Image (cartoon, rainbow, N blue to C red):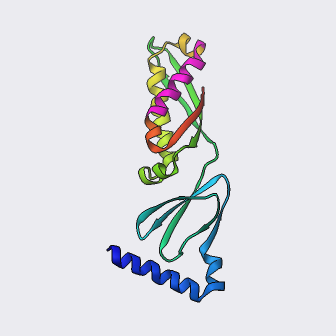
Amino acid sequence: MGCLASAAIWFSYFCICITFPITLWFCFKKVAQWERLIVFRLGRLRGVLGPGMVFIIPWLDRHTQVDMRTKAFSVPPQQLITADNGIIEMGCEVKYRISDVQRLTTSVTSPEHGLRSFGKTVLLNVLTKNTVKESERDRPIIAGLMQKQLNLRVLEWGIEIGEVTL
């Protein structure tokens, strides 16, 4: 497989050199400073490239652009029963950013869906252990606890939780 892959790569470089002015428009990709390009060459991870101009071989490389800017999502308000059998309805907003692009691309298929469902689960788990008065009074403490629990899991995915607000 290694010899065949090397031969395909060298043949591709040869074809690019022969059709020089035309193929250059297809081989260079511009990556903005807040994006990274994950490149797979013949199914193997070539690495994280960018920002700036990046050279790829269009017929051998598959690439994915990943936005590194801070994003946010909201967990819709959930009705739940607290430790003192009170009923409250509370939601939260979670701000996150991608810390490791390579780990994110190779480990998680849809990070936003996983974050939403995991955020909802953590919200329910944390709030059901408190009473109604504690939930109202200690919102920043509960938000910090939720952020710690979320970060324990999603750091493995290459995502870092920046802030949780209830």
Image coords of residue 44 (percent x, y): 41, 64
**Which of the pair 82/56 is nearer the observer?**
56
Image quadrant in which the C terminus is located: top right
Total marks in image: 0
**Which of the pair 136/138 is nearer the observer?**
138
Left-right relation of 17 to 127: right
Find the magenta span and give its range: 137-152
Is the residue 68 above or below the residue 118 in the image?
below
Q: Quadrant of residue 165?
A: top right
Image coords of residue 119 (percent x, y): 50, 34
Q: What residue is rendered at 35% in x and 79% in y?
A: 4
- Residue extending farthest to the bottom is 18
Is the residue 18 above or below the residue 147 in the image?
below
**Which of the pair 77/65 is nearer the observer?**
65
Image quadrant in which the N terminus is located: bottom left
Image coords of residue 95 (percent x, y): 61, 37
Q: What residue is rendered at 47% in x and 53% in y?
A: 105
Image coords of residue 157 (percent x, y): 45, 44
Residue 149 among magenta residues: yes
Q: What residue is rendered at 38% in x and 76% in y?
A: 5
Is the residue 161 above or below the residue 131 in the image?
below
Q: What residue is rendered at 43% in x and 54% in y?
A: 106
**Which of the pair 151/115 is nearer the observer?**
151
Of helix, strand and loop, which mostly describes the magenta segment? helix
